[in-house]
Image: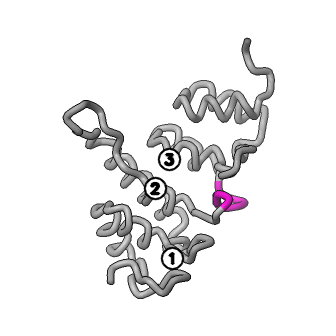
């Protein structure tokens, strides 16, 4: 049975990377559309964590975060959510999708270019995107965030800095 609730349909369209449907549904409901689940991800956050670059770019250009920047229930920003990503394993040999992390890098850069002041915002644990990228071993994101001026001396709530 098809869902009648436009918010649920938009959430599913974003999760399935159905850009055609996303474009239609944002005309009928709030494109931010926070998930009623415990993480409270917005449409843009869902596109980011699932690596749906085209949908992410469309929502960003449509003004998704112009009035309020996306944060989940733990105050993780889009840059922080992208720093948490690991490429999915594609086969039994443990090979991963190399473009998945490339998409994460491109989405992080798109978001930073629009909202550069967010680079050192922290979540409820005091961790920034740089902390998280370093903890998750996302070396390319660590390099990018450092190159963009992220403060590598900021300590989290436990006194840990991202790189030492």
Q: Which of 12 and 95 is in front in this view?
A: 95
Q: Which of pointers 3 and 1 lies earlier in the amino acid sequence?
A: 3
Q: Is mark 1 on a helix, strand or loop?
A: loop
Q: Disc 3 to disc 1, how far (Cα)? A: 19 Å
Image mark count? 3
Q: Which residue lies furthest to the left in this view?
A: 93
Rendering coords of residue 91 (x, y %): 26, 30
Magenta region includes residue 69? yes
Q: Tell me, yes or no, whether the two marked residues, 3 and 1, touch with CB atoms within 8 Å.
A: no
Q: What element carries label 3?
A: helix
Identify the residue at image location x=71%, y=45%.
37
Residue tagged 2: 82
Q: Which of 118 and 110 is in front in this view?
A: 118
Residue tagged 1: 120
Residue tagged 3: 49
Rendering coords of residue 16 (x, y %): 54, 29
| Magenta span main SS | loop
Question: In front: mark 3 or mark 1?
Answer: 3
Q: Disc 1 to disc 2, how far (Cα)? A: 14 Å
Q: What element carries label 2?
A: helix
- Residue range in magenta is 65-73
Q: Which of pointers 1 and 2 lies earlier in the amino acid sequence?
A: 2
Location of residue 31 by image quarter: top right
Identify the residue at image location x=51%, y=57%.
81
Check the image and report above or below for 57 versus 77: above
Q: Tell me, yes or no, whether the two marked residues, 2 and 3, touch with CB atoms within 8 Å.
A: yes
Q: Disc 2 to disc 3, how far (Cα)? A: 6 Å
Q: How dense is the environment of label 1, judged by Cα within 10 Å: few (below 14), some, or many (20 and up)?
A: many
Identify the residue at image location x=80%, y=27%.
5
Magenta region includes residue 127? no
Check the image and report above or below for 56 versus 7: below
Location of residue 121 by image quarter: bottom right
């Amino acid at each position: 049975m098809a869902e009648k609730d436009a918010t649920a349909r938009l959430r599913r369209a974003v999760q399935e990377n159905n850009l055609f449907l996303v474009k239609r549904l944002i005309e009928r409901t709030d494109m931010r559309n926070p998930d009623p689940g415990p993480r409270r991800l917005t449409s843009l956050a869902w596109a980011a964590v699932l690596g749906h670059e085209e949908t992410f770019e469309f929502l960003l250009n449509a003004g998704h975060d112009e009035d309020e920047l996306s944060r989940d229930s733990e105050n993780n920003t889009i840059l922080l959510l992208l720093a948490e990503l690991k490429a999915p394993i594609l086969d039994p040999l443990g090979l991963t999708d190399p473009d998945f992390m490339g998409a994460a890098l491109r989405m992080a850069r798109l978001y930073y270019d629009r909202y550069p002041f967010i680079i050192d915002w922290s979540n409820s644990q005091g961790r920034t995107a740089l902390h998280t990228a370093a903890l998750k071993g996302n070396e390319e994101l660590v390099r990018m965030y450092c190159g963009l001026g992220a403060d590598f001396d900021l300590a989290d709530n436990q006194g840990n800095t991202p790189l030492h």
